[in-house]
Amino acid sequence: MSISAQLFVANHHDAVAYAAALDSGHSAKAPQVSTDVPTLTDLDLEVLGEQAVKTVHATGTECELAMVDIELDSLLEVPAGLVAVFAELMDLEDQEDVTQLAADWAATEEMSSSVEETEPLVRMISELASAAQQGDGLGLYFYSA
């Protein structure tokens, strides 16, 4: 089974090694904190990021995913500021704001889906972002084949 898209938490070295193994068709042990997101693209995450920044009032936060290694165009890193924004969603006093964020994201041209589909994704992304903030040198990575 090949992975089409995945979000995962790792340090830089492990993220590069994992993506390189996947790209070369070798089996690779998935990072401990990861989830398959076969329907998401990097643009989808950036659009969610732009909306999440508004939700938590973190204007000026970079939302564009960054290339990790010039030889691995399949691996992108979520900027640290955006990881913090995504992690903050878990701690919002009014969790209806997260539901509204998911609804707004679902209504975008990029997603065109329902809040029932996007809300679990938003919450899962928030949990992964929180995990990424738990250790030194960890980041949130997006792999797409």
Image (cartoon, rainbow, N blue to C red):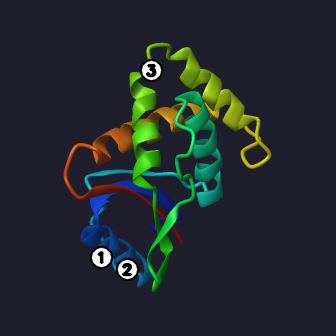
Which label sits on residue 92? 3
Residue 15 relative to residue 145: left or right: left
| Quarter of the C terminus within the rendering | bottom right
- Give the number of the mark in front: 3 or 2: 3
Q: Residue at x 26, y 69 (%)?
A: 14
Q: Nearer the viewer, residue 9 or 25?
A: 9
The vertical placement of 1 against 84, above or below, is: below
What's the amino acid at mark 2?
Answer: Ala
Judged from the image, the secondary structure of the residue bearing numbered disc 2 is: helix
Taking 83 as reference, is 120 left or right?
right
Q: Is 22 left, or right, of 74 in this rendering?
A: left
Q: In this rendering, is residue 3 above or below 79?
A: below
Q: CA distance from mark 3 to mark 2?
A: 36 Å
Q: Earlier in the sequence, mark 3 or mark 2?
A: 2
Q: Which of the 4 quarters of the picture holds residue 77?
A: bottom left
Rendered residue at 20%/49% (across/down): 135
Tag count in the figure? Answer: 3
Residue 80 vs residue 73, the one in the foreground: 80
What amino acid type is highlighted by mark number 3?
Leu
> Which mark is nearer the camera, 3 or 1?
3
Label 3: few (<14), some (14–19) or many (≥20) C-alpha neighbours in 10 Å = few
Task: Answer whether labels 2 and 1 touch (C-beta < 8 Å).
Answer: yes
x then y, percent, for residue 98:
55, 24
Task: Give the residue pinned by disc 2.
Answer: 20
Residue denoted by label 1? 17
Identity of the residue drawn at 58% across and 50% down: 45
Which amino acid lies under the numbered mark 1 shown in the image of this protein? Ala
